[in-house]
Amino acid sequence: MPVAAGLLLTGGASARLGAPKAEVRRDGERLADRGARLLRAVCDPALEVGPGVSPLPAVREDPPGGGPLAAVAAGAAALRARGSTAAVLVLAVDLPFVDVGLLRWLADRAPAGTLVPRVAGVAQPLCARYAADDVAVAASRLAAGASSMRALLATLAVTYVDEPEWGRVAPPDAFADVDTPDALARAGLDWPGPPAG
């Protein structure tokens, strides 16, 4: 039974990649479809925040392409409008090696509250669980002029989990993102179309 709501963030500009990250394919499946499938397996409700490229109901951040903090704020408002008071799993579309086991572990792991994995000491706020009250803070941080997820984390009581903990349920590359053509090639992912010239 789902214990969390989910937000799939798809609105990034993909400037360094040169093609929409959501259209990149892993084993023939678009990352937008894969992310939606994973969140649906763990979360209810699950929404896309972005241009509507996944099978999930979509809402748009303001301004469109305004970054992850704006996306989380828009997603949190949309979940509240749907009556959701659950914790929220946030998943960026460009994390092709996240799997259901990791998302379920994030959703279920005690203690309750905001839970953010770290890789080599670096927080991974775009594959994390946020308490419902904490995710709602994104809008106030945005209104105060903040623009990064780090600004949100700085205002929350966060439980950080490092590799020895999350590594029990996920491979070492679970948080590897795909931001450049080189990263895409190294990850063995399929280009969505001709590389940008």
Image (cartoon, rainbow, N blue to C red):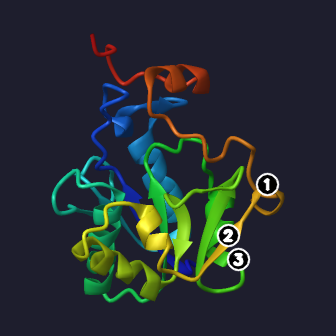
The local secondary structure at tag 1 comes to loop
Three-letter code for the amino acid on which mark 1 is drawn: Gly
Which residue is identified by label 3?
A: 109
Q: Earlier in the sequence, mark 1 or mark 3?
A: 3
Three-letter code for the amino acid on which mark 3 is drawn: Arg
Eyeballing the image, is 101 above or below 138? above
Please state if 193 lies on the left or on the right of 105 as rendered: left
Which residue is identified by label 1?
A: 167
The local secondary structure at tag 2 comes to strand
User: Which residue: 32% across, 89% down?
Assistant: 83
Which residue is identified by label 2?
A: 160
User: Which residue: 42% across, 21% down?
Assistant: 191
User: Which residue: 27% across, 46% down?
Assistant: 53
Mark 3 crowdedness (10 Å alpha carbons): few <14, some 14-19, many ≥20: few
Residue most toward the top?
Answer: 197
Compare residues 175 and 99 and report the one nearer the observer: 175
Please state if 189 lies on the left or on the right of 112 as rendered: left
Compute the Cα span from label 2 to label 3. 12 Å
